[in-house]
Image: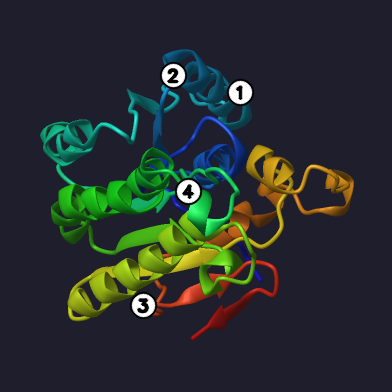
Amino acid sequence: MTQPRMDGRLALVTGATRGIGRAVALAFAKAGAHVILTGRTAGALTEVDDEIRSVTGKPDGATLITLNLKHGDKIDALGPSLYTRFGKLDVVAACAGILGTLTPVGHITTDAWAEVMDINLTANLRLIRTLHPLLERSEAGRAIFVTSGAAVAKNAYWAPYAVSKAGLDALVKTYALEVANTNVRANLLSPGPIATAMRAKAFPGEDASTLKTAADIAPAFIKLADPKLTENGRIYDAKTTSWLG
């Protein structure tokens, strides 16, 4: 099957400086999109921008936005700022996330809990809230959020991460119901086991060479960004390349 193109599309990627976010940003750029990169450090964003210029041969590169998702007021300002510059947004791929501390429920500190919820759940609520008006202005707005098999609470000691992803699933599915009669579609993507720094932290003894890379699953994000996509409020399993639920 021919890979969909993204020519003329404007796509924002969170967590774009490493792991899945970086791979998605590069894949979007290669497919023809103009990518808005967000991440915590300007230097890391510049590195990704340089790589985009290299692989696409385009001198204009990407748009860079230094953004720490812990700073809710900065997320809230994102929509108005992008509206002023671009007037719309075609795709948002929310790839940023943290694992948090793996520990028994009885040992979870309030601060550790709050940090995971802030990044994995609340930041995505703020992204929806600030970017939805821009997605509505697109002919085919597409919102993609990264979930996890951990959302079904299958691992001991993973409570903050599992709860944050279960909450994200509910948030995005609810949002999808609310936009069902519009030109916006919102879905979740479950990447499966991927060789990332987060995975290495969770499974330090695992042989990363046996896992798929972030680049391997990046085409799945292009599939979910396709203007022709009709699915809404569903989970796409990148490991099995099938829709769940």
| Residue under the image location 73 percent in, 42 percent down | 200
- Please state the horizontal and vertical placement of residue 178, each as a whole percent of the image: 18, 76
* The quadrant where residue 84 appears: top left
Give the farthest residue toward the front.
Answer: 106
| Residue under the image location 88 percent in, 53 percent down | 210
Distance between the Cα atoms at labels 4 and 3?
A: 35 Å
Marks 4, 1: nearer the viewer? 4
Distance between the Cα atoms at labels 3 and 2?
A: 33 Å
Q: Earlier in the sequence, mark 4 or mark 3?
A: 4
Residue indicated by mark 4: 108
Residue 108 falls left or right of residue 190: left
Distance between the Cα atoms at labels 4 and 1?
A: 44 Å
Q: Are marks 3 and 1 in contact (CB under 8 Å)?
A: no
Q: Residues within 10 Å of mark 3 (few under 14, many from 20)?
A: many
Q: Earlier in the sequence, mark 4 or mark 1?
A: 1
Residue indicated by mark 3: 232
| Residue under the image location 40 percent in, 72 percent down | 228
Instruction: Tell me the SS state at disc 3.
Output: loop
| Residue under the image location 33 percent in, 45 percent down | 118
Marks 2, 1: nearer the viewer? 2
Q: Amino acid at mark 4?
A: Ile
Relative to 183, is 64 above or below? above
Marks 4, 3: nearer the viewer? 4
Residue indicated by mark 1: 54
Residue indicated by mark 2: 41
Q: Amino acid at mark 1?
A: Ser
User: Can residue 83 be seen here?
Assistant: yes
Q: Earlier in the sequence, mark 2 or mark 4?
A: 2
